[in-house]
Image: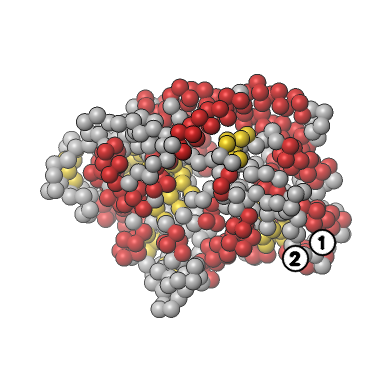
Amino acid sequence: MKKPVIALSGIMLGMTALLAACGDDGNTTGASGNSNGDIKMTPVGTYPIVNEKATLKVFTKQDVNVENYETNEFTKWYEDKTNVKVEWEVVPGSAMKEKLQVKLAGGDLPDVFMSSGISDSQLVGYGSQGLFLPLNELIHQYAPNVKRMIEKAPYLSYYLYAPDGKIYSIPNVGETFHATMPKKLWIYKPWLDKLGLQVPTTLEEYYNVLKAFKTQDPNGNGKADEIPLSGANGTTNGNNEIESFFMQSFLFYDRSNYLMLDNGKVEFSADKPAYREGLRYLRKLVQEGLLQPDAFIQDRKALTALAEDPAGSRLGSATALYWGNLSIDNGPSGRYKVYVPVPILAGPDGKRYGFDRGYGVDNGAFVITKDAKNPQLAMRWIDWFFNEDAKLAEGMSDYLGKEGVGWKKPEPGTKGLDGGPATYQMLVPFGTKNNFRWSQTAPRFQDLSFRNGIAATKEAETEVRLQQITKDYYKPYSAAERYVPHMYFSDEDLAQFGDIQKSITTVVQDFMLKFVTGTLDIDKDWDKYIKELENAGVKSYTQIIQANYAKLKK
């Protein structure tokens, strides 16, 4: 059967299109069972997957809330359920990018990569080279839950299909809107209260608060040791980078690509006059000692040390997805409770341009490699994770843990996040280190109804609080219509795009840091910056995106 190329189109591909896209990449022996070499599987949808013990080599990122994957209670439960034993290779998040690249280049491949930060260019590049297997037929024959997800979430058509029409990865999908608006700012309320200040709503009000934090000794120790504003570098996945929040007061700003839509046209954002004004504001904060220069280069651990100083918090405010990315969530100091949200601050024109992705998709979440001994087994193994309702009915969840331990069925009348009936109630809060669940290790499909089904109780405080905060402080300023949707590129475009994007990112980040810290002058050296962007290929970059976006809209 010829495999059609599914181009960069916005067609909402449901089950019919999935079947049409399938090739002959898998084997089946009919309803009685599946055979792959010397392994015989049970019928799809039944467990165990195999009657004789099988193994699966899994390469994954360490979830900081999981103590030990080998001895984890869910690991043991799922091994008993499937009769598949996992051979783990677990890598700390800080080392993942380097370790992944070494793994891909060295040829010593696991059966699967799971939650390993595989990029789009790696998916397409290594997929076309044969290192990653096409999953179309494997999904069709062995993954009914994944197929159901594709039908329920038509926006996945932007993410699933490479330009050659093949699926090289199963994504992790979440429809919780607080995670799709991750650029937030938090301020230490005890200092506001001591100084008789309110949560600011404009850039000018915020500037005045920072001045008060710096000059009026809000921690009361008689020393000028307060840090009014800080953050962390953009490599820790906590959305701690400073400029992403503050640029929302000036223009739509997507740090991943520096692109935005303006009346249907793709525009580069990091050369606009509004971007320049954002840099001026940040420069002013650094110049007056209100913004810690280390905020652009330090890691999250250093940021947390400021908030959790044993002598008392030294951190007045910080950028982060949530309070646990700057303090210790559920920590003994309790300071995580009193970092309160600051809305997107009204900018010079009174407007706000909230970064909003609309839905959360981690595209490279599950990849089967060419060295997988049993690709069908790997697909059967992962499919279970994509049915949250079945997990609750079964009394066990990778995300929540065992019923009665990590969660329970709520009492009648208990409300969920949206005010409707709750379907599950947390017993152990998110962010708690444990050895009975995988937390956010495995990819899954959590649609909005599932996320809203969590009981709005104390144990779900993080989810309840963050959902409400996003709804009240950030969602009203959503500029989702300016978000450039995900797209893949042809081999020809990809050959140019990857190098150009890397060069442009380097230029933007390098000059941003130098402008804000004063190494370069925003006025005198601006033309130099624009010239460097031109040399990096910014014109070709936007042209490639525009051409492919036009295809999406056809």
Residue visible at 38% across and 45% down in the picture: 12
Residue visible at 62% across and 31% down in the picture: 505
- Quick one: SS at disc 1? loop
Residue 218: assigned label? 1
The image quadrant of residue 523 is top right
Q: Position of residue 434 (x, y in %)?
A: 47, 58
Amino acid type, label 1: Pro
Marks 1 and 2: CB-CB under 8 Å?
A: yes
Residue visible at 45% across and 76% down in the picture: 414
Front residue of 187/204: it is 204
Residue 396: assigned label? none
- Quick one: SS at disc 2? helix
In which quadrant of the rendered image does the C terminus lie?
Answer: top left
The image quadrant of residue 34 is top left
Amino acid type, label 2: Pro
Residue visible at 80% across and 57% down in the picture: 205
Q: Is residue 64 visible?
A: no
Front residue of 137/5: it is 5
Q: Earlier in the sequence, mark 1 or mark 2?
A: 2
Q: Position of residue 26 (x, y in %)?
A: 22, 36
Q: Position of residue 338 (x, y in %)?
A: 68, 64
Mark 1 and mark 2: Cα distance apart in space: 8 Å
Q: Position of residue 485 (x, y in %)?
A: 50, 41
Residue 190: assigned label? 2
